[in-house]
Amino acid sequence: MIERRKIKHIALVGTGTIGGSFCAHFLARGYRVTATDPAPDGEAKLRAFVARIWPQLREIGATKLDAPPPFAFARDVASCVKDADFVQENAPETEALKIKVLAEIDAAFPKERVIASSTSALVMTRLALECAHPERCILAHPFNPPHLVPLMELAGGERTDPAAIDLAEAFYAEAGLKPVRLKREIYGHIANRLQYVVWNEAVQMVLQGYCTAADVDAAITEGPGRRWAFIGPFLSYMLAGGEGGLKRTFEMFGPRDTMAVDRASRIRLTPEQQKILIDQVEEMLNGRTPADMARARDARLVELAKIKNAFEKD
Ligand SMILES: NC(=O)c1ccc[n+]([C@@H]2O[C@H](COP(=O)([O-])OP(=O)(O)OC[C@H]3O[C@@H](n4cnc5c(N)ncnc54)[C@H](O)[C@@H]3O)[C@@H](O)[C@H]2O)c1
C-alpha cells in the first residue's frame, strides 16, 4: 500500500553526474537531502559540484539563497534511506549492480514509500527482481543535467502499483520538474528512443561521407533544435501544413516521409568507424575539454530556462 505522504526529505543513492545535479536541484527547491555514494572522494566531489552549480539555480529563479543549505552525506545505503520520504537511485547503468542496489534500498526503506530509479534504458520489471516490495519501485528517467533540463519520464514495471507513479508524478511537478508518464515500460523510454534514431542517421551520414559531424550538429542546433525547445515533432508537423494543419501535412508529405522511413537503418559501429567519429568530434572541440563544453552548454541552458520560465507565465 503506497502511503500518500508529503515528500520533504529525499535520499539520493549514487551522486555522480545525475545524483549531483539532483542534489542541487532538490536543495534549491527547499527539500531536505541525504546522499550516499561509495566512491572514496564521493562526498567531497558532491559538495564541490553542488557549490559550483548553485549560481545557475539562483539565476534561473529556483532559489534565492546565495549558497547551498547544509545536507547530510551517509556512509551507506541503509542509513541514507531510512528516514527519507522518497528515494532517487542514480547508481551506474549496469543491470546486475542496480538490482543489488535496489534490493538494498528496499530492505532498509519503509515499505509504503516510493523508490525511483534514474535508469536511462533498463526496465523496472527486471531491476526490482530482488525487491520484497516491487510495487513501490518506479522508473523516473531524468535528462542531463536535471537541474537545467526538467523532463522526468515515468513508468512502472509489471508489479508496480500505479499509485506509486501517481505519487511520484505529483511530487516531481511540485519540485519544479516536468513528469511525462508512459502507459507501459519500453526500452529507452520516449526521448532516448527518439535520440537513438537521430543518432543512427547522424552516424550513417557522416560515415557515408555526405557531411561532417560538425554539419550534423549545426543542422540540429540551427534548425529543428531551435523549434524543439518550444514545440515538439507533432506541433511542428502540424504547422508545416499551414492553415490545413496536420491533415494537410500528411497530404503534402506522406509519400516523402514513407521514403525517408524506409531509408532509416540501424548501425553497429566498428572500432574503426568509432575512431573516424571521435577524430571529427576532437576537431570540433578544437582544444576544448568536455568540462569546457559542459560549462558552455550549462550557460546556454540557464538562458533557455529563463526564456521558458517567462513563457510559462503567459
Ligand atoms: N549521464 C546522463 O546523461 C544520464 C541521463 C539520464 C539518466 N542517467 C542515468 O543515471 C544513472 C547514473 O548515471 P550518471 O551519469 O550519474 O553516472 P556516474 O558514473 O556519473 O555516477 C554514478 C555514481 O554511482 C556511484 N556508485 C557506484 N556503485 C554504487 C553503488 N553500489 N551504490 C550507489 N552508488 C554507486 C559511483 O561512485 C558514481 O558516483 C544511470 O542509471 C544512468 O543511466 C544518466
Image (tube, helix red, strand yellow):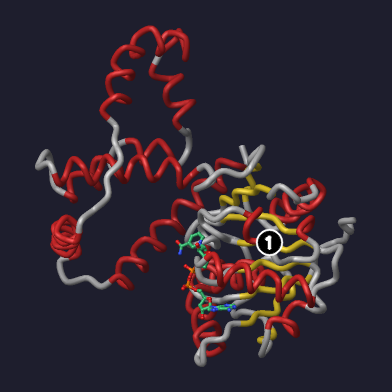
Q: Is residue 158 left or right of residue 180?
A: right
- The answer to whether residue 56 is seen in the rendering is no
**Horizontal and vertical percent for residue 54?**
54, 74
Q: Quadrant of residue 65?
A: bottom right
**Horizontal and vertical percent for residue 97?**
56, 72
In terms of depth relative to the viewer, which is nearer, 152 or 176? Answer: 152
Q: How many marks?
A: 1
Mark 1 belongs to which amino acid?
Leu
Q: Mark 1 points at which residue?
A: 129
**Horizontal and vertical percent for residue 246?**
47, 14
Q: Within 10 Å of the Cα at label 1, are there few (<14), some (14-19), or many (20+) other Cα atoms?
A: some
Q: Residue at x 58, y 82 (%)?
A: 37
Q: Residue at x 80, y 79 (%)?
A: 82
Split into 4 quadrants, where in the image is the C terminus?
Answer: top right
Is the residue indicated by label 1 positioned so its CB lies within 8 Å of ligand 1?
no
11 relative to 135, above or below = below
Q: Is mark 1 on a helix, strand or loop?
A: loop
**Horizontal and vertical percent for residue 309?**
57, 48
64 relative to 47, above or below = above
Q: Which residue is drawn at 56% across and 43% down?
A: 186
Q: Quadrant of residue 21?
A: bottom right
- The answer to whether residue 199 is seen in the rendering is yes
In terms of depth relative to the viewer, which is nearer, 126 or 201? Answer: 126
In terms of depth relative to the viewer, which is nearer, 148 or 210? Answer: 210
